[in-house]
Image: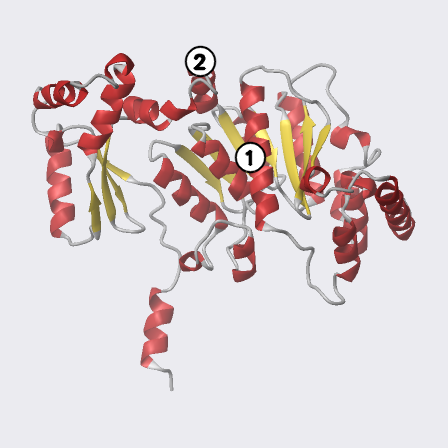
Amino acid sequence: MKNPLQSHLHKITGDDRRLQPIFYRLQRRQDAAALRKLLKSRQVLGVSDDYSEQLKELYAINHPTEVYQPDFQQRFQKFLASLGPLADQGVWVYFPWNGNLVHILPERDFFKVRTARNRYLINEKEQQKYYDAVIGIGGLSVGNSVLLSIVLQGGGRHIRIADFDRLALSNTNRVRGSITALGMKKAEMTARQIYEINPFAKIEIFGEGLTPSNIGKFFIGPPKLDIVIDELDNIAVKFLIRQQAKQHRVPVIMGADDGDNAVIDIERYDLKPAPKFFHGRLGNVTYEQLRGLDKFGIGKTITQHIGPENITERMQQSLLAMGKTIVSWPQLGGAALLNGSAVAYCVRRIVNGQTLERNRSIISLDEKLIPDYNSKTQRRNRNKIANQFKKMFGL
C-alpha cells in the first residue's frame, strides 16, 4: 500500500515551468487590474518596494555635481514631490517561481543605475555594446559562473543557453545553486538567476543541449550570435560548435578549470585568417571520430587539448584515479569563479573590438601565490610529471 504522504509529494514534485518574470505597468488599466487579481490570489509571498531609493540613486547619477552639496536632500525631495504617486510609476515585476513582487525603474533607468558603478572602468559606449551583445553558451558548470559574471557587469541582455543536465548535489561545490533547485534543469535554474539580476533580459533555452539538428538555430537565431562560450564536456559537440563558428564567423571562448587555476582558449573565427579548430592541437580530427571515443580516448583527447604541461600535478593524479577511487575529475568552486571572471572579461573586450590574446592564456593562482613555484627545482619536477603523463596517454 502506498504511503499517502509519499504519493502527494511525488505528485507535486517536478519542474515549475514558469521561467519568465511577469511585468505590470500600472499606467495601463489592464495591468493594474491584473495585478489586483494576482494580489487577491495570494500567490504573492513577498513585496520589495524601495522605488524612492532607486529614484534617489538615479537623481544623483543624473546630477553628480549636486550630490555633495548640503541641500542635496532638499533638492531630491522637491524632485520626488513633483512626480506624483510612486506606486503608479516604473514597473512591478512578479517572479512566479518564488512569489516575490518587486518595484523597479523602467529598463533604461534601471540599466543606468545598475551599471553606474562600472563607470569609468567601462565607459558608456562600451557598456551599451556589452549589454546589446547576443551571447550563446553551452554547458552550465563553469558556464553558470561565466553567465553570472557577464550579467553582473551589465552585459548580455540577449542570452542563448544550451544544457540538458540537471543540478545534482555534487554540483553544488561549484555551481551557484541552492538545494531548493536540486533536480532542476541547470539552464532553467540559471535563467531564473539571471532574471533576478536583470528581469529585462531575453533568454532562450535549448533544454536538450546542443545537437547536430539544433546547433544551426542556436547560432543564427534570429538574432545571430555575436559570441559563443564553450563550457561543454562533450568533445564531439565542441567540434560542432567550431564548425558553426567558422561558418558564421563567430568568436569562441572556452574556460577550463585546472585545479585552482583557469585555462582560457580564444578562437577568433570572426577574424582572418580563421584559426584551425582547437588551434590545431587535436590534429585533423572529425566529428565522427570524436563521437566514437571511449572513456580513455576522451581523457586522452581532453589532455591533448589542454596540454599535459598545463595540467597541475594533483589534477593529473585525479585523472588517473577516475574509476578507481573517484568517479569523475574534480572541480573547485573557486576555479569556476576565476574562469567566470576571465571569460566575462574576454567577452566584453571582443564585443567592443578591443585587443585580446588570440590563442590561450593560463591564469594560475599557483604561479602567482606559491613562493617557489618558478624555482628550477619546481619547474624540473613539473616537466618530469608532464612527460610521464604524456607517455601514459601516448602523446
Residue 125, numbered label = 2
Task: From the image, tell me which residue sits under label 1.
Answer: 341
Q: Where is the N terminus found, in terms of image quarters?
A: bottom left
Disc 2 marks which amino acid? Lys
Q: Looking at the image, which residue is at 55% across and 35% down?
A: 341
**For the point 42% across and 19% down, which residue is it?**
119
Which image quarter: residue 91? top left
Query: x, y percentage for residue 84?
Result: 7, 24
Residue 84 in view in this figure: yes
Query: Would you identify the image quadrant in which residue 127 lies?
Result: top left
Confirm or deny contact between disc 2 and disc 1 (CB under 8 A). no
> Up-down: is 335 above or below 362?
below
Tell me if residue 293 can be seen: no
Q: How is the image coloured?
A: secondary structure
In the displayed structure image, the side of residue 227 where residue 53 appears, left or right: left
Farthest residue toward the bottom?
1
Residue ID at (34%, 25%): 111
Q: Nearer the viewer, residue 217 or 110?
A: 110
Callout 1: helix, strand or loop?
helix
The numbered disc on residue 92 is none
Name above or below for residue 197 compared with residue 294: above
